[in-house]
């Protein structure tokens, strides 16, 4: 893959090309925008472009060749001058040891590339000591190095970190181009299915191109029904699973609210689950659904603070019980 093949972010890619052309690439960039829309892909292909052996000898725009040893090594993440950091461990954080190691690596000259590039994925998950240590790197960036922070929750980053980065906002892809892309990928799928995939992905191509998207969605509904029926059952595999579920839950609440407000099933995203959505929507008042959506959204924001899972489960069950009348009688949605 190369920059020219990234779809939907042409504006940002042109800005990046302009920086490189004028030799004015900021030492720290912040790629902000929803999960799965192409931020990491752009960062990796920027790292490839900066270090590509063919840069300058190509007749097209500033880009990587995707074929030279440097491009191949970066694709496999085995290039000695390109680093990709992401949250680790049960707490899902980027810790100070990781940052110290990165700082040491950045302090040497590039081994074989032109520029050292550090990509920090989910940078909002730097824990406080790591974030503070990292700040010194942003204040005095090692010569020739580029740091790219990636975040779907840029408001969770320290203001002092944010203000030292040039921010580029990635927007979701329009539904129409998503539909076409998914169609190219899933040849033979009927139109109804294609539209569901495009809508589910909400402009996030990374998600649409995930073969399991519909299975994940189905599982998220099962989990919701499980929580309504039996809040003591542990339904999430891990923290990431729990976080993802909250996104799905917002989607189900969106459909429940739409059906309640309009009584028009054509407006549902999950049209194939209309029966279940109708059952849930019949049990709730619109105002309650909207309040519940806000609560779920708020809990999702708190997940970074490692919420206790059993308590969270009980709390969600309670919120739904307060919103729905029949749910209170216990578990008949299961
Ligand atoms: Zn190359």
Image (cartoon, helix red, strand yellow):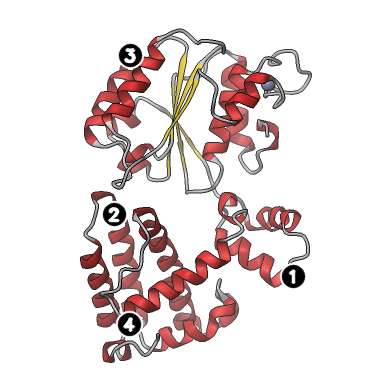
1 or 4: mark nearer the eye: 4
Evaluate whether residue 17 shows in this view: no
Q: Is residue 304 above or below residue 291?
A: above
In primary-sequence order, the first of circles 4 and 3 is 3
* Residue identifier under label 4: 229
Residue that badge 2 annotates:
303
The picture places residue 296, in percent across and down from the top left corner, at 32, 65
The first of marks 3 and 2 along the sequence is 3
Nearer the observer, disc 1 or disc 3?
A: 1
Tag nearer the camera, 4 or 2 = 4
Q: Is residue 12 left or right of residue 117?
A: right
Label 4 and label 3: CA atoms lie apart by 54 Å
Q: Residue at x 57, y 54 (%)?
A: 203
Near mark 1 (Cα within 10 A), the count class, few <14, some 14-19 or many ≥20, is few
Cα–Cα gap, marks 4 and 2: 23 Å
Q: Say which residue label 1 marks.
A: 190
Which residue is located at x 22 percent, y 31 percent? 129
Residue 16 left/right relative to 188: left
Instruction: Identify which residue, 22 or 6, lies in the foreground.
Output: 6
Q: Quadrant of ligand 1?
A: top right
From mark 1 to mark 4, how far is it between C-alphas? 34 Å
Residue 211 locus on image (x, y percent): 61, 58
Q: Which residue is mark 3?
A: 140
Position of residue 144 measured from the top left corner of the image (x, y, whole percent):
47, 11
Q: Residue at x 54, y 25 (%)?
A: 78
From the top left corner, tell me how far across and down residue 63 is, in percent: 67, 24
Q: CA distance from mark 1 to mark 3?
A: 54 Å
Question: In the image, is 321 to the left or to the right of 282?
Answer: left
N-term mark: 1 or 4 = 1
Estimate how packed mark 2 is, as few (under 14), some (14 to 19) or many (20 or more) residues with alpha carbons within 10 Å. Answer: some
């Amino acid at each position: 893959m190369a920059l020219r093949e990234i779809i939907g972010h042409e504006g940002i890619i042109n800005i990046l090309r302009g920086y490189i052309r004028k030799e004015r690439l900021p030492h720290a960039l912040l790629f902000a925008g929803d999960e799965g829309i192409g931020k990491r892909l752009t960062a990796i292909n920027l790292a490839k472009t900066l270090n590509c052996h063919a840069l300058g000898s190509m007749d097209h725009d500033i880009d990587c060749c995707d074929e030279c040893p440097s491009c191949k090594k970066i694709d496999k993440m085995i290039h000695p001058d390109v680093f990709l950091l992401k949250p680790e461990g049960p707490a899902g954080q980027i810790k100070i040891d990781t940052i110290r190691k990165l700082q040491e690596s950045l302090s040497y000259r590039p081994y074989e590339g032109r520029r050292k590039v550090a990509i920090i994925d989910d940078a909002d998950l730097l824990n406080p000591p790591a974030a503070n240590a990292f700040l010194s790197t942003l204040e005095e960036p090692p010569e020739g190095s580029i740091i790219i922070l990636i975040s779907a929750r840029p408001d969770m980053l320290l203001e002092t970190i944010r203000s030292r980065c040039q921010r580029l906002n990635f927007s979701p892809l329009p539904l129409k181009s998503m539909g076409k892309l998914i169609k190219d990928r899933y040849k033979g799928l009927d139109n109804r299915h294609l539209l569901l995939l495009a809508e589910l992905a909400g402009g996030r191509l990374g998600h649409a191109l995930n073969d399991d998207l519909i299975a994940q969605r189905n599982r998220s509904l099962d989990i919701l029904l499980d929580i309504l029926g039996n809040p003591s059952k542990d339904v999430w595999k891990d923290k990431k699973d729990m976080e993802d579920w909250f996104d799905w839950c917002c989607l189900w609440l969106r459909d429940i609210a739409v059906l309640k407000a309009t009584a028009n099933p054509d407006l549902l995203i999950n049209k194939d689950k209309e029966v279940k959505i109708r059952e849930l929507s019949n049990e709730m008042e619109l105002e309650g659904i909207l309040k519940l959506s806000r609560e779920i959204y708020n809990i999702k924001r708190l997940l970074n603070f490692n919420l206790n899972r059993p308590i969270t489960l009980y709390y969600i069950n309670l919120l739904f019980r307060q919103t729905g009348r029949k749910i209170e009688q216990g578990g008949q949605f299961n």
